[in-house]
């Protein structure tokens, strides 16, 4: 297919030509989170011809995603978002390359993955991920494009963009919000609700900012926070200021901070007797009739599993601990995090040997399908 | 009278705490006084994070308020 023709409508724009298109082709963008923000951002980046896009998400498509995550259809429910998104995007533009990361960003992998990209787009839906992206990008000196929504409002801001004002200290997320809010302090889409077009608008604007940063056209939203209100039909912009006394983000800071809240559950787990096992060990264990396999996911969660097991959702587990049999217990969940927490609850009240499937069913199905 | 008024804008989850997206208050000397007044009337504000801006510029210290200034209280959002 002729790429000159493919991109002809943008290449005839004033200030945009072959050299600009070539910058897009040479660019590497990492998109973390393939939800309401990530889907439109990905589609527009692919459409514009960004040469390499990394897509990262551990989740599978669920029916409640479909009102705002328009890359996915009803037939995709239960499938990994990265798998579906990569397929759709390559149908849209087979001349670009897509790198797939079907797992979550964490303290161990963040620096390793982000270092290979020119910039990061934040399509995540939680503060732990946003602070981790910020801190890793500061360590690596990479710009990132923050986006977030709350009901009918959306926020957008570029952080840590170095080449605009080389002599000034860079502004990062911790200059604005030095500390991560506690869980429950700020509500998520799941609890507060969101109209689908809001992440659609903000995610599309994130793609626009990425294209501006890559090509050098226009003025990036750096040092300015853009707030859009759908109900009022207006926007409000605030100029950011580099604060004194905000934390210096270096390797020690990174290790300490992300060790604390990212792996908090793991740290506690080490004090108890929970043994984390990999998929291969799990497959051996579950064949043993003396092992009680316990799924602690909520009842609406996918995928359905086809091996013999009991299900007690995390939300009901505390009341059911004394009903568990006198057997060794192997706990499974989506990502292998809740199962550790469930193991702690059980170990606190019962003297049972507890295993937890590391990486959860996400790891299991990746291995089994492979 | 009106031109002695400071306008205060609330965003995101803060509108739930205040019950409004906008307040107009008279006779507020500076941002510390404003914050204190808001915390007395809306104690839930103390349990949430936000930054303040005066006339669309973020502030990092107590800032005097003039008539017809606009103050914004902006929390982080996390939804995606």
Image (cartoon, rainbow, N blue to C red):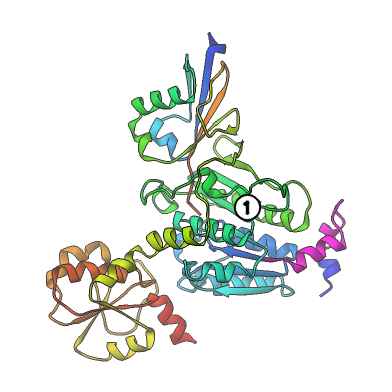
Residue A299 in view here: no
Where residue A279 sits in the image (x, y, percent)? 38, 84
Check the residue under mark 1 and report the chain it is in.
A
Q: How many marks?
A: 1
Residue A224 colored in magenta in the image? no
In this orientation, which residue lies closer to the viewer: A45 or A64?
A: A45
In this orientation, which residue lies closer to the viewer: A249 or A53?
A: A249
Where residue A173 sits in the image (x, y, percent)? 54, 49
Q: Quadrant of the N terminus of chain A?
A: bottom right
Q: Residue, x 52% and y 22% (percent of image)?
A: B7
Q: Residue, x 65% and y 67% (percent of image)?
A: A117
Q: Where A261 sits versus A343, above or below? A: above
Magenta stretch bounds: A7-28
**Residue at the top extreme?**
B1
Instruction: Indicate left or right for A368 with A241 as reference.
Output: left
Give SS at disc 1.
loop
In this orientation, which residue lies closer to the viewer: A177 or A257?
A: A257
Residue A24 colored in magenta in the image? yes
Residue A26 in view here: yes
Instruction: Indicate left or right for A23 with A336 as reference.
Output: right
Where residue A358 sits in the image (x, y, percent)? 37, 77
Instruction: Indicate left or right for A154 with A302 as reference.
Output: right
10 Å neighbourhood of mark 1: few (<14), some, or many (≥20)?
many
Q: Residue, x 66% and y 46% (percent of image)?
A: A222
Instruction: Indicate left or right for A141 with A187 as reference.
Output: right
Q: Which residue is mark 1?
A: A160
Where residue A9 sits in the image (x, y, percent)? 83, 58
In this orientation, which residue lies closer to the viewer: A133 or B15?
A: A133
């Amino acid at each position: 297919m002729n790429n000159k023709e493919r991109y002809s409508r943008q290449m005839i724009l004033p200030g945009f030509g072959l050299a600009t298109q070539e910058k897009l082709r040479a660019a590497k963008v990492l998109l973390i989170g393939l939800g309401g923000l990530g889907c439109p951002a990905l589609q527009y980046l692919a459409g514009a011809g960004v040469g390499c896009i990394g897509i990262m998400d551990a989740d599978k498509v669920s029916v409640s995603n479909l009102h705002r995550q328009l890359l996915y259809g009803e037939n995709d429910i239960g499938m990994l978002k990265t798998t579906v998104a990569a397929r759709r995007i390559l149908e849209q533009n087979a001349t670009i390359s897509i790198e797939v990361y079907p797992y979550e960003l964490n303290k161990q992998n963040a620096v390793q993955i982000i270092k290979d990209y020119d910039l990061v787009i934040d399509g995540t839906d939680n503060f732990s991920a946003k602070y981790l992206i910020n801190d890793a990008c500061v360590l690596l000196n990479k710009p990132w494009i923050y986006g977030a929504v709350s009901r009918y409002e959306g926020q957008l801001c570029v952080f840590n963009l170095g080449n605009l004002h080389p002599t000034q200290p860079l502004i990062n997320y911790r200059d604005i919000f030095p500390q991560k809010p506690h869980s429950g302090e700020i509500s998520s889409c799941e609890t507060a609700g969101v109209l689908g077009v809001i992440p659609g608008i903000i995610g599309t604007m994130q793609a626009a900012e990425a294209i501006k940063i890559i090509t050098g056209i226009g003025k990036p939203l750096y040092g300015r926070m853009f707030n859009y209100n759908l109900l009022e039909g207006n926007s409000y912009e605030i100029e950011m200021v580099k604060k004194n006394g905000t934390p210096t983000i270096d390797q020690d800071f990174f290790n300490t901070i992300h060790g604390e809240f990212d792996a908090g559950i793991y740290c506690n787990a080490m004090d108890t007797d929970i043994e984390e096992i990999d998929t291969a060990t799990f497959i051996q264990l579950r064949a043993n009739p003396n092992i009680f396999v316990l799924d602690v996911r909520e009842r609406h969660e996918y995928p359905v599993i086809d091996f013999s097991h009991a299900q007690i959702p995390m939300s009901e587990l505390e009341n059911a601990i004394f009903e568990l049999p006198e057997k060794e217990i192997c706990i499974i969940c989506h990502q292998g995090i809740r199962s550790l927490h469930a193991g702690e609850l059980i170990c606190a009240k019962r003297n049972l040997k507890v295993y937890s499937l590391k990486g959860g069913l996400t790891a299991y199905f990746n291995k089994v399908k492979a | 009278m009106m031109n002695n008024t400071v306008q205060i804008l609330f965003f995101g989850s803060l509108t739930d705490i205040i019950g409004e997206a906008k307040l107009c208050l008279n006779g507020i000397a500076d941002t510390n006084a404003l914050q204190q007044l808001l915390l007395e009337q809306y104690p839930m504000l103390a349990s949430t994070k936000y930054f303040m801006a005066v006339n669309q510029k973020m502030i990092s210290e107590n800032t005097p308020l003039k008539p017809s200034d606009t103050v914004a209280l902006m929390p982080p959002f996390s939804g995606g």
